[in-house]
């Protein structure tokens, strides 16, 4: 047991994205196509930026073992063929949105805020804060992806596994990534920095939540 890690897990559980009205509507099959395609266009920008969050924490970390783990995560995200942004574009194509359409979509304010917040914490915060930021996001992803796949297959006509491969890949990948991040975090957090680390986690959780709320507001989904 680690009381500091438990407190971080408590922050994440309190604002887990599966509790957000957007994902609740997703699982019930209540999202219209416009809301789904808007989400796909916007979330791509975050997916494409995610490797830069990893590299920011990697660049300032003095511990080789931690850097190796971050590098392994970065390679998973960026070096595959297809890599993770490309898998997301395949998901968008399953919704009828072309790659060019996604690439040319401007970031909404909530999307820009999410990317800016993650970059701010990962670049400008301590290594502990950066690791906690990554953990706050990646630890949620396996459960979210399982729920998304279920909803896509039940309610939104997704029958080709290639169109939801992004989510399939992240179930196991982020289960491993977040477990490694949690283990590493234990050696970085203590009584002196836990308050700042928890504050960083809350910033990330709020930005993730607000990104989904932006989609809800644009499509009259109560949130």
Image (cartoon, rainbow, N blue to C red):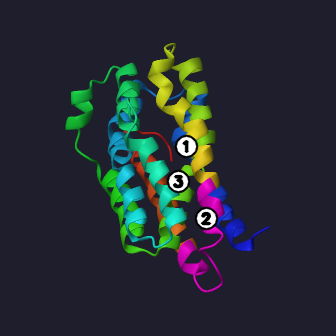
Which disc, if any, is residue 184? Answer: 2
Asked if residue 160 lies left or right of residue 183, the reply is left
- Residue at image coords 55%, 30%: 168
The reply to whether dot 2 and dot 3 touch (C-beta < 8 Å) is no
Q: Which residue is mark 1?
A: 21
**Badge 1 local density, few (<14 within 10 Å), some, or many (20+)?**
some
Compare residues 50 and 101 and report the one nearer the observer.
50
Q: Which residue is mark 3?
A: 137
- Residue at image coords 39%, 50%: 50
Which of label 1 and label 2 is nearer to you? 2
Residue 134 seen from this side: yes
Query: How far across and how far down the image is residue 26, in percent?
Result: 54, 32
Q: Which residues are magenta?
A: 180-197
Asked if residue 98 lies left or right of residue 209, the reply is left
Does 111 lie within the magenta span? Answer: no
Residue 11 seen from this side: no
Instruction: In the displayed orientation, state which residue is furthest to the bottom.
Output: 192
Does 188 lie within the magenta span? Answer: yes
Which badge, 1 or 2, is on the more N-terminal residue?
A: 1
The reply to whether dot 1 and dot 2 touch (C-beta < 8 Å) is no
Say which quadrant the N terminus sits in: bottom right
Q: Is residue 190 above or below residue 111?
A: below
């Amino acid at each position: 047991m680690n009381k500091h890690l438990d407190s971080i897990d408590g922050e994440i559980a309190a604002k887990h994205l599966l509790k957000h009205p957007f994902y609740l509507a997703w699982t019930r099959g209540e999202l219209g196509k416009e809301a789904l395609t808007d989400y796909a266009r916007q979330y791509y920008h975050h997916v494409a930026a995610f490797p830069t969050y990893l590299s920011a924490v990697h660049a300032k970390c003095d511990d080789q073992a931690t850097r190796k783990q971050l590098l392994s995560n970065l390679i998973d995200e960026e070096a595959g063929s297809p890599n993770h942004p490309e898998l997301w574009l395949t998901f968008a194509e399953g919704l009828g949105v072309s790659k060019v359409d996604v690439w040319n979509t401007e970031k909404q304010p909530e999307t820009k805020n999410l990317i800016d917040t993650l970059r701010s914490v990962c670049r400008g915060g301590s290594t502990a804060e950066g690791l906690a930021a990554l953990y706050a996001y990646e630890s949620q992803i396996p459960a979210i992806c399982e729920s998304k796949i279920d909803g896509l297959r039940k309610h939104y006509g997704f029958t080709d596994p290639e169109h939801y491969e992004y989510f399939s890949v992240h179930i196991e990948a982020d289960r491993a990534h977040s477990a490694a991040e949690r283990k590493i975090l234990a050696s970085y957090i203590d009584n002196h920095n836990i308050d700042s680390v928890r504050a960083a986690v809350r910033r990330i959780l709020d930005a993730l939540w607000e990104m989904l709320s932006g989609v809800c507001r644009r499509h009259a989904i109560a949130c």
